[in-house]
Image (cartoon, rainbow, N blue to C red):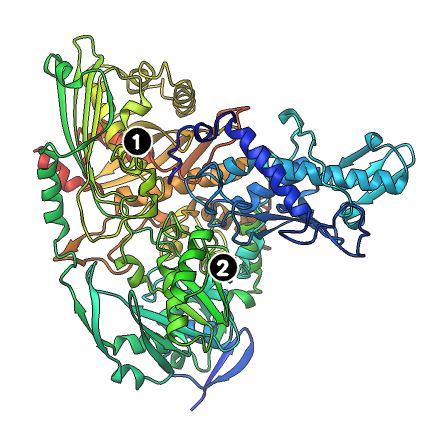
Amino acid sequence: MPIKLTVNNQSHELDIDPDMPLLWAIRDHLQLTGTKFGCGMALCGACTVHIDGQATRSCVTPVSAVVGKSVTTIEGLGTPSGKAIQDAWVNLDVPQCGYCQSGQIMSASALLAGNAKPTDSDIDSAMAGNICRCATYARIRNAIHEAATALPGAPAGTKG
Amino acid sequence: MYFRHLKDPSSLWPGLSASELTRRQFLKLTTIAGAGLTLGTMLPEGASAAAGAPLATPFVRIDPDNTVTVVSKHVEAGQGVWTGLPAIVADELDASWDQMRVESAPAKVPLYGNFAFDPKGSVQGTGGSTAVANSWMQLRQAGATARAMLVQAAAAQWKVPAGDITVSEGVVAHAASGKKATFGELASRAATLPVPTDVKLKDPSQFKIIGRDKLPRLDSHAKSFGKQQFAIDVMLPGMMTAVVMRPPRFGGKVVSFDATKTKAVPGVVDVVQIPRGVAVIGRDMWAAKKGREALQVTWDESAAETRGTDQIMTEYKQLAGRPEAVTAAKAGDADANLKSAAHTLDAEFEFPYLAHAPMEPLTAVCQLSPGKCEIWAGCQFQTIDQVNAAAASGLKPDQVVINTLAAGGTFGRRANAESDYIAEVASIAKASGGKYPVRLIWTREDDVTGGRYRPMNYHHITAGLSKDGKIVAYKQRVVGQSIMAGTPFAAMMKDGVDPTAVEGHAGEQYDLDNVHVTWSQPKSAVPVLWWRSVGHSHMSFSKEVVIDELAEAAGKDPVAFRLALLEKHPKHAGVLKLAAEKAGWDKPFPKGKGRGRGIAVQESFGTVVAQVAEITVKGDTITVDRVVCAVDCGIAVNPDVIRAQMQSGIGYGLSAALHGKITMTDGHVDQTNFHQYTVLRINEMPRVIEVYTVPSTNPPTGVGEPGLPPIAPAVANAVRAATGIKLRKLPFDLAAARTAKA
């Protein structure tokens, strides 16, 4: 029985084990490699995607659980908050090795979509699930603030 | 430095200074390339240019589309070489930053050898924070050479004197005639010209791109849009995925295995034995992983490590009390002066094994075809990886093609003499008959339990002060496994001392008259490796904590006490002063509420870094509020990358100080994933990190590692200032240290 997945607004039918984590389905079967494998236990956040807009760890989410839902990966991130986050990431040169950054960006854009003006504490809470061994954390924090300022609807006088 | 322990490489090649050597080697190699022996695109003198041919030298290629591609012999693992190396070329070339590109060099020595490793460039590799330092002259020459050829081409085309031509922002121009051309327009013609050997380099005052404060990284966009390709992202037609079952204890070997249940897992394609374990090959990662879970292996553990880390530490302490040791440094008579000292200090330090845990678990792809083995990986030791892949696949090194991809972090992990994960994938490809390309993925559990750790260490330091508060004796016994012994790098050990085990000791870093540093080398089957900043990661800690305690015992300010010991170390003194000044060290730090301030300084890999840490202790939790960091790394090639690397070193070092430990019970590693091998997360990153660079006209030195060594001792010194508690065991355990004190 093929599994029906909707990823980045495209429908796919895959003949795979329903228990297969979404991570391996999108990487190995859809060749969408922007989403990364880091731990396999939802401990590091490298595999973060959006499921119906919610930041979700794809490494522990079986494909059977996302049938009928909308999956967005870094390749399909086109929301205003996503774009603002990516622009800020480039502008502040956040990435070092870059491996964790897809996951960081998916978590950060989900944060910003639900909280237009996050404080440092909000950022710590929302981003503590995403590990960066290069410790780009200081720039991640700054980039989220910069993106929040750049978004339409940011309080007047704060646009950078 | 991983193994830049040849203090004066030129001594091996009399009559040449290191910089001259690099320069001459470079010219010779450039000329070879010009004859078409390497990249093959440089036309011999007098030949006509093929339309659309690029101007290609070993280190820079200018294409007709007006892009300038720098060929990087170093792996980009986050440390910024894909930006730093192009910046060096771009400046001498007077290119526009927008036209710069970068690609990885193939494996080839000595052309792409690391001249900081050894003067013959016999190994191609990245490590020891050498990338910019050993590319500096080479790439300036490459940029200036290409620039001269573009100018010559323009002069010939426009029939004007070359001396009247200017180059700026990627445009070649002749003011009098109003003629202009892009690099791309001139590239094919320039490629027909002989390679000049007498180009003039810029005076550093003329640099425009080197030192530019905000030079965008060339890899930021790809890494922010999920487009950067890592080894784990390589997708070849028909490729299979493999995972390996390795011995449960270090030193174990396969006796036999039963793959019946594994082969029944849908998607499993094959199960093969390789020298390091049993590989399960599947059509995707899920199948391979499920297949491995069903695999039954019988192990021979007769030579395996069966001790726990508690027992190992006990044995280290016993070994420290015995005479078996080699002398790493000796000056004056520390023993006699210790006996007559007015005040003595006796301190023991314990350091755990540490895993590197880069975010990309080790991954490599191998494709075998008759007489050829092709590897894709984030290779850190390209030519060593080539030799090991050749041995594993039964081919000759020149039949192995190395494709170096961006590495998802390494911190030293990918630089090992056995090329473990690369040899494994080549073994799997061979054992499966080369029927399909194979991608080997280590799971996080494989990574955390897989060894090649920063060695466990025990340090015992005894030091003496005179009545007037001067250090009259400093003795240190270091007990820790050798990284080099038993590998080809053992040739770099001198008088039985592995320099990576004791580097950065007090005798090196301070003016001390009576020093004796000894090292005992315990044996274990636990494989150890260089971990970001290597010996400095532990040596700086015990030294800077002891110096701080001695300052307190002498009734001196920690900065003033250090400065008095740094008269012969002006670089250290300058950095220390800058950090203290920027931190406001001369102003009293508010006491109470658990707040404290500490400082530390360390030279590693030719770069000196000092850090002031301001902390708050609440209950048993240490919060680092602010870090002020000063660095002297010679000419600042890319100030923003320097800032990023200092932030990174601080974060990685803090991760180890607050959390990092690998322990074993009966030889089994206790930690398997990030829930047990805990690491620094964003909520623990200091809210304020300030980085200041000492202005310098000296050639650049590295920044990938030197940001790390001072942070842990600076924090420990701050905790002592706040609470009186002496943290001498890593990672910090405030509750245990408090109990020990009470």
Check disc 2 and report the residue beneath it: A109
Q: Is residue B372 above or below residue B480?
A: below
Q: Amino acid at mark 1?
A: Ala
Mark 1 lies on a secondary structure that is helix
Asked if both marks, 1 and 2, belong to the same chain, the answer given is no
Mark 2 lies on a secondary structure that is helix
Point out residue A55 in the picture as x, y percentages from the top left corner.
Answer: 43, 65
Check disc 1 and report the residue beneath it: B714
On screen, residue B602 versus residue B460, left or right, reads right
Q: Is residue B414 above or below residue B496?
A: below
Which residue is pictured at 42% across the width and 40% down the height? B647
Disc 2 is attached to a residue of which chain? A
- Residue A118 seen in the current view: yes
Quadrant where the C terminus of chain A is found in the figure: top right
- Closer to us: B4 or B628: B4
- Residue A57 seen in the current view: no
Q: Quadrant of residue B675?
A: bottom left
On screen, residue B155 versus residue B70, left or right, reads right
* Residue at mark 1 to residue at mark 2: CA–CA distance: 35 Å
Point out residue A110 in the picture as x, y percentages from the top left corner.
Answer: 47, 61
Q: Quadrant of residue A1?
A: bottom left
Which residue is pictured at 30% across the width and 66% down the height? B275
Which residue is at the far bottom? A1
Q: In front: mark 1 or mark 2?
A: 1
Q: Amino acid at mark 2?
A: Ser
Point out residue A65 in the picture as x, y percentages from the top left corner.
Answer: 38, 79
On screen, residue A87 versus residue A59, left or right, reads right
Disc 1 is attached to a residue of which chain? B
Point out residue B630 in the picture as x, y percentages from the top left corner.
Answer: 43, 28
